[in-house]
Image: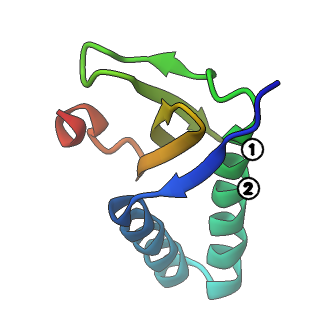
């Protein structure tokens, strides 16, 4: 299997911050840190076998969508030697509109 570099866009980093804030406010900062780490671990695992998820060329060329724990949707592209994490959506946010 080919290994690829994982890159996060500024928007994906902002999404992670927002998810952290939401969970920290509603629960506990320690819980938020652990959840953010699970999301990052999941995304980083795309370095091998990045052709997972659903290809959604109808929304954006090369877009792939994959879910995590029924609450998170990760939008990414595979570009040669790298995987670009475009956005990370939480709790059913409308990713289709955001990525068009």
Instruction: Give me the residue at 57% from left, 42% from top.
Output: 82
Of residues 2 and 88, which is closer to you in this image?
2
**In which image quadrant can residue 4 be found?**
top right
Q: Position of residue 61 (x, y in %)?
A: 29, 21
x and y percentages locating residue 80 in the rendered image = 54, 31
Instruction: Count residues near mark 2 (Cα–Cα under 10 Å), then give few for <14, some for 14-19, many for 20+.
Output: few
User: In the image, what residue occupies the spot 52% across and 73% down?
Assistant: 23
Q: Identify the element where label 2 is drawn.
A: helix
Task: Work out whether residue 94 can be spotted.
Answer: yes
Q: Residue tagged by mark 2?
A: 41
Image quadrant where one finds the C terminus = top left
Give the vertical position of 77 relative to 93 (above or below). Answer: above
In the rendered image, residue 73, in percent from the top left (x then y), is placed at 48, 40
C-beta proximity under 8 Å, tags 1 and 2: yes
Q: Quadrant of the N terminus?
A: top right
In this image, 93 relative to 82: left or right?
Answer: left
Q: Residue furthest front?
A: 81
Report, in whole angstroms, how far the alpha carbon at label 1 lies from the one at label 2.
6 Å
Check the image and report above or below for 54 versus 97.
above
Mark 1 lies on residue: 45
Query: Can you give x and y, in whole percent of width and height, for residue 27 in the image?
Result: 58, 78
Image-quadrant location for residue 69:
top right
For the point 74% across and 44% down, which residue is it?
A: 45
**Does residue 72 appear in the picture of this structure?**
no
Q: Residue furthest right?
A: 1
Q: Is residue 90 above or below residue 47?
A: below
Relative to residue 37, is residue 83 drawn left or right?
A: left
Circle 1 crowding by C-alpha within 10 Å: few under 14, some 14–19, many from 20: some
């Amino acid at each position: 299997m080919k290994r690829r570099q994982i890159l996060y866009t500024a928007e994906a980093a902002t999404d992670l911050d927002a998810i952290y804030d939401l969970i920290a406010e509603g629960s506990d900062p320690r819980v938020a840190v652990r959840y953010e780490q699970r999301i990052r671990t999941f995304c980083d695992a795309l370095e091998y076998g990045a052709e997972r998820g659903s290809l959604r060329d109808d929304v954006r060329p090369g877009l792939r969508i994959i879910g995590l724990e029924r609450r998170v949707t990760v939008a990414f592209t595979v570009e040669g030697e790298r995987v670009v994490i475009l956005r990370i959506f939480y709790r059913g946010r409308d990713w289709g509109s955001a990525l068009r």
